[in-house]
Image (cartoon, rainbow, N blue to C red):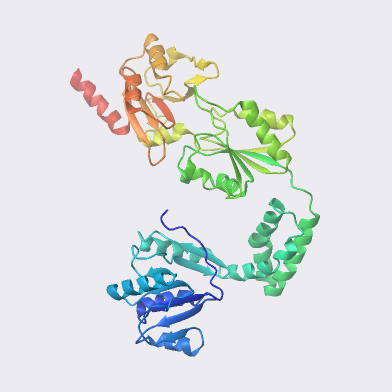
Amino acid sequence: MRHFPIFLDLRGRRVVLAGGGDAALAKLRLILKTEAKITVFAHDPAPEITAWEADGKLRLVRRAFAPGDALCAALAYAATEDDAEDARIATLARADGALTNIVDNLDGSQFITPAIVDRDPVTVAIGTEGAAPVLARKIKADLEAALPPALGLLARIGKSFRSAVEALPMGRKRRDFWQAYYFKAGPEALAKEGENGVERALGDLLIDHITAQERKGHVALVGAGPGDPELLTLKARKLLDEADVVIHDRLVAPEILELARREATLLNVGKQGFGPSTRQEDIGALMVEHARTGAQVVRLKSGDPGVYGRLDEELDALDENGIGWSIIPGITAANAAAAQLGQSLTKRGRNSAMRFLTGHDVKGFAEHDWRNLTKPGQVAAIYMGAKGARFIQGRMLMHGASPDTPVTAVENASRADARIIESTLATLPADIDAARTTGPVILMLGLAPREAAAALPQLQEELA
């Protein structure tokens, strides 16, 4: 992030702008929305600028920008649309101590003005580091359509009521109040009774929340999916946005953790096969500890919480302590990996069943019904199988599997940095070692990438 987004208080502060044409007008329309004291320097200003001067909205100086003109100014805009003149203005303004912006010159500017969605006092700023203005405009248009014009009025009324809401304790009680106001009570009252109705609704709502019983702590065991944030369920996103505490696995993608509220407490309880791990008892204790304080806890698990997520042990810990819970399923890695390969997990004439297996458990490498797995057409998703690749290869070959049996390793399934490692039983351990994987890997036994699978019958025919 090159440009750090902030909201600057311009109430009563100087903003200077040099220029009188279209570029100057575009910036002034935005700056005039603030409470800044604006001075414009222009030999030949556009009619709109002279009209704004006549209305007392700005001060107009009909000459070129000179040394000292930006003294005590918070911001200075160079908008003459002449590169050499704009550079001169920016140099002088910086010498006077102002932050400078040269319109349409990213590298010459100390700050940039984002695209803005204005629902005063609700303001949404959209920036793309100058890389994609057309994208910023599209996002702005979408937000303009999504945010009702009345949102600003609701926010202004709510702002005047903030001191009264201090009767509620900080934290969740206040958040619940404001959520009920902005998303239910406020819009309903405005639609039925107008502005006066909103003020009455705020008072009634505050009394309801002051007298309401404390909300009990709760733990939602949420599937984070395989890593792509767009594969999260709507319910999972909603719970992340509301959570006080997020207790997450090591494999949960950073992009998904970014969706949690900024004020939420994030606790990493990651486990690593054959490596450092948080004890399961400690995870249970953490969930109970935070839920007992009344917190809304999200236990965020990679993939689906019910697939090799030790879900039952965590539910037992919550039940033993009388903590309420809910389960929100997620897309498991096997689904994402099969999609990455362009394959289905089941196929008529090939396999009517498929298996979810683990490469290792708490005792070490896991044993399975290897003989049945060697039958033609078998498909299995082997979780946590990369480190046990040699063990799996040995067991399968020992029970009669063909060395040519396809096994595809998928690293970081569904993510932008996903990798497909095409292999067979004969070369599986060597291929995984050569790939030097660092992310989560799932082995898809019996499945090759779609193109390779389509070429296999022809290749076998040629070899015959």
Q: Is 232 situated above or below 384?
A: below
- For residue 122, say whether it is visible: yes
Classify 65 as above or below 422.
below
Residue sitting nearer the eye, 112 or 235: 112
* Image label count: 0
Q: Residue furthest right?
A: 211
Residue at horizontal 78 percent and vertical 58 percent from the top: 208
Task: Give the residue displayed 41% in from the left and 62% down from the top.
Answer: 136
List the single residue furthest toward the bottom.
54
* Residue 372 at x, y percent in the picture: 44, 15
One can see residue 82 in this view: no
**For residue 379, side relative to residue 14 (left or right):** left
Q: Position of residue 211 (x, y in %)?
A: 81, 55
* 42 over 425 or under it: above or below: below
Left or right, residue 456 beside residue 215 = left
Q: Position of residue 299 (x, y in %)?
A: 60, 37
Q: As drawn, is 273 to the left or to the right of 211?
A: left
Name the image quarter holding residue 378. top left
Taking 233 as reference, is 418 left or right? left
Q: From this view, report whether residue 421 is shown above or below residue 48.
A: above
- Which one is nearer the viewer's eye here, 21 or 85? 85
Q: Nearer the viewer, residue 341 or 278?
A: 278
Q: Residue at x 43, y 19 (%)?
A: 388
Residue 161 point in image, percent of width and height: 71, 67
Quadrant of the image containing the C terminus: top left
